[in-house]
């Protein structure tokens, strides 16, 4: 599985479906496999960060550099698991876990004020000043019951985003 010259078996499809907690239908998994094979230009069964950057929507995303560290070297099963956070069938918990990983740039399980400030900078660029970003972030944290010194863990993100009606969906075209 993962080599562009091979085909998915029913067993492979079911295994991937189970691995991604049924976030995608079997038909969607087949479509994702075709897309994976297109991205895997050298046919090695893995997609590199450079290959991910060939997707125009990904390349222009302000958070693409943060997300690249999460996707470099994914095999097909990992590729589908990564994308599952964007499925309409993904749970809110799965979506929040994905967002937490984007913020937790060093992977230590804790998000600092500066981690959040860095993401905010990536999202806003030069549209607002550093002082404005700090003020906005400080206010948002205080409204949620935290301070600039707080180290947020996944459960904090669940608490903050858990009732937000969070939407993170992409359409998987089915051929």
Image: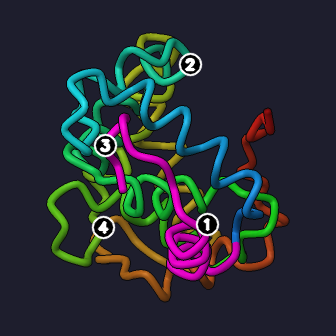
Of labels 4 and 2, the one closer to you: 2
Q: Nearer the viewer, residue 37 or 163?
A: 37
Asked where in the image residue 172 lies, by quadrant, the reply is top right
Q: Earlier in the sequence, mark 4 or mark 3?
A: 3
Q: Nearer the viewer, residue 4 or 46?
A: 4
Q: Is residue 140 left or right of residue 165?
A: left
Label 1 packing within 10 angstroms: few (<14), some (14-19), many (20+): many
Q: Which mark is residue 95?
A: 1
Using the numbered discs, state the Cα–Cα distance from disc 1 to disc 2 in whole angstroms.
19 Å
Of labels 3 and 1, the one closer to you: 3
Of labels 4 and 3, the one closer to you: 3
Q: What residue does disc 4 label?
A: 111
* Residue 75 image offset from top left, x and y in percent: 30, 53
Label 2 packing within 10 angstroms: few (<14), some (14-19), many (20+): few
Residue extent of the magenta highlight: 1-22
Of labels 1 and 2, the one closer to you: 2
Of labels 2 and 3, the one closer to you: 3
Q: Nearer the viewer, residue 164 or 44?
A: 44
The residue at the point 39 percent across, 41 percent down is 119
The residue at the point 26 percent across, 44 percent down is 45
Q: What residue does disc 3 label?
A: 3
Residue 84 visible at all: yes
Q: Earlier in the sequence, mark 3 or mark 1?
A: 3
Q: Is residue 2 left or right of residue 90?
A: left
Q: What residue does disc 2 label?
A: 57
Residue 118 visible at all: no
Q: Is residue 12 within the magenta segment?
A: yes
**Can you name the residue that lies furthest to the bottom here?**
155
Asked where in the image residue 117 lies, by quadrant, the reply is top left
């Amino acid at each position: 599985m993962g080599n562009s010259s091979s085909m998915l078996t029913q067993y492979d499809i079911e295994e991937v479906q189970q691995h991604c907690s049924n976030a995608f239908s079997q038909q969607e998994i087949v479509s994702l496999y075709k897309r994976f094979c297109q991205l895997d230009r050298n046919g090695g069964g893995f997609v590199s960060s450079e290959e991910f950057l060939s997707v125009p929507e990904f390349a222009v995303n302000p958070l693409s550099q943060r997300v690249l560290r999460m996707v470099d070297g994914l095999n097909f099963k990992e590729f589908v698991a990564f994308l599952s956070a964007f499925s309409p069938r993904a749970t809110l918990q799965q979506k929040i876990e994905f967002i937490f990983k984007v913020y937790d740039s060093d992977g230590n399980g804790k998000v600092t004020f500066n981690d959040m400030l860095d993401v905010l900078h990536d999202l806003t660029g030069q549209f607002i000043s550093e002082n404005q970003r700090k003020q906005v972030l400080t206010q948002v944290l205080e409204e949620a019951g935290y301070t600039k010194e707080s180290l947020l863990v996944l459960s904090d993100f669940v608490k903050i985003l858990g009732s937000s009606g969070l939407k993170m969906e992409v359409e998987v075209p089915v051929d």
